[in-house]
Image (cartoon, rainbow, N blue to C red):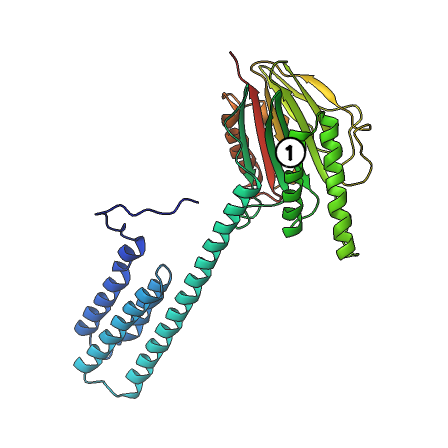
């Protein structure tokens, strides 16, 4: 995150809470005037407690204490003018006003402290997300690229969904995946997996060898975890690993139990499924000899949409799954970033604004000459 910079000669922007304080101050003034012009039998000073109560709803402890103090001063002044200081009734009202003001100041302090803690947590979470899911560049060789991560919980910016892309001398290698489970363990698994992919994508000669390396890495991580905690549950990762050559209008893919990508062409949407999908990573059943590498045409102007199951398993209020291909068919824009903007807006509208699971998407388009 970039630090905030205050420009020389510029004053801080006037906070909205400072403007809203006019409301409780006007209320104190109004109650004071009405108390002075109404008969002594009509007591309005008890209403002064509404001023600090209103202030606490939008301001911090200092401003709440200031307004509460003014309300107390107004109460004492009215009691003095009406010769009621020291009476049982006014002492009760004044004590109630003081107690409520103190309570509201404490409440504002605790709320603001929790708010600052949440801001710090979200800042750390955002930094961790940028370190874990490095933003993909807009351009990788002949490809236009866009990516997006949608967290189910607003406070939790990271999870088990993952993606990464690596530039090689002959093309692009890319992965999108989803770690089984939730919580910090899935985040740790995702971080370890992405590190293994970036290393293998640069060092391994074939796509099958990349996937074999990932299998070994996930299995070794799980074995180490079982040694430390024998009760740990089985772990696996679904992933689609792709290679897009620079010079040939094709793409290669090994799908390890992951939802099939969508290939978009004018008037045509195709799921890139394989006849015999490879099992998820981490189950101990993969090697570079058992990986099925599928080849698909990927020509100039073609767009590929990769996604995690958080997209297609999202449900509307009636419980119906999100029909991704059907909704993408309505897209009329141009470019990967515009496609992801369309899907994100449509997906959130479909589910009513809140996802039940994290979701990640990556869009690739082979640029036209």
Q: Quadrant of the N terminus?
A: top left
**Residue 307 appears anywhere in the view:** yes
**Residue 315 appears anywhere in the view:** no
Q: Is residue 287 left or right of residue 11?
A: right
Residue position marked by numbered label 1 in the rendering: 176
Give above or below for 13 relative to 75. above
The quarter of the displayed image where residue 2 is located: top left
The residue sitting at 62% across, 20% down in the picture is 170
Q: Nearer the viewer, residue 23 or 223?
A: 223
Q: Is residue 275 left or right of residue 1?
A: right
Q: Is residue 292 left or right of residue 39?
A: right
Q: Is residue 24 left or right of residue 57?
A: left
Please state the horizontal and vertical placement of residue 8, each as a whole percent of the image: 24, 47
Q: Nearer the viewer, residue 103 or 47?
A: 103
Q: Identify the residue at the far front of this view.
A: 203
Q: Nearer the viewer, residue 8 or 318?
A: 8
Please state the horizontal and vertical placement of residue 55, each as a whole percent of the image: 33, 63
The residue sitting at 21% across, 66% down in the picture is 29
């Amino acid at each position: 995150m970039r630090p905030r910079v205050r420009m020389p000669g510029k004053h801080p922007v006037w906070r909205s809470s400072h403007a809203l304080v006019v409301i409780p101050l006007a209320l104190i003034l109004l109650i004071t005037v009405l108390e002075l012009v109404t008969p002594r039998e009509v007591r309005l000073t008890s209403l002064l407690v509404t001023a600090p109560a209103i202030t606490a709803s939008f301001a911090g402890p200092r401003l709440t204490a200031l307004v509460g103090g003014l309300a107390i001063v107004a109460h004492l002044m009215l009691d003095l003018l009406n010769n009621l200081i020291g009476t049982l009734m006014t002492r009760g009202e004044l004590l109630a006003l003081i107690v409520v003001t103190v309570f509201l100041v404490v409440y504002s302090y605790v709320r603001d402290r929790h708010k600052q803690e949440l801001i710090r947590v979200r800042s750390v979470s955002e930094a961790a997300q940028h370190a874990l899911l490095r933003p993909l560049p807009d351009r990788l060789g002949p490809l236009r690229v866009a990516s997006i991560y949608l967290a189910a919980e607003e406070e939790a910016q990271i999870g088990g969904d993952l993606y990464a892309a690596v530039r090689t001398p002959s093309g692009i290698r890319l992965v999108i995946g989803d770690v089984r489970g939730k919580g910090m363990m899935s985040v740790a698994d995702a971080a370890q997996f992405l590190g293994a992919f970036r290393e293998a994508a640069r060092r391994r000669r074939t796509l099958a060898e990349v996937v074999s390396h990932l299998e070994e890495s996930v299995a070794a991580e799980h074995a180490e975890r079982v040694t430390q905690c024998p009760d740990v549950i089985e772990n696996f990762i679904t992933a689609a690993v792709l290679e897009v050559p620079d010079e040939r209008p094709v793409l290669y893919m090994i799908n390890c139990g992951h939802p099939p990508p969508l290939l978009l062409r004018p008037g045509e949407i195709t799921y890139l499924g394989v006849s015999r999908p490879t099992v998820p990573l981490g189950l101990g059943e993969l090697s570079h000899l058992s990986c099925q590498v599928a080849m698909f045409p990927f020509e100039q102007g073609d767009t590929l949409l990769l996604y995690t199951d958080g997209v297609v398993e999202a449900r509307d209020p009636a419980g119906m799954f999100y029909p991704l291909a059907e909704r993408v068919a309505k897209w009329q824009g141009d470019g990967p970033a515009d496609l992801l903007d369309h899907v994100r807006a449509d997906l959130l509208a479909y589910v009513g604004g809140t996802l039940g699971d994290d979701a990640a998407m990556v869009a690739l388009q082979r640029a036209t000459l």
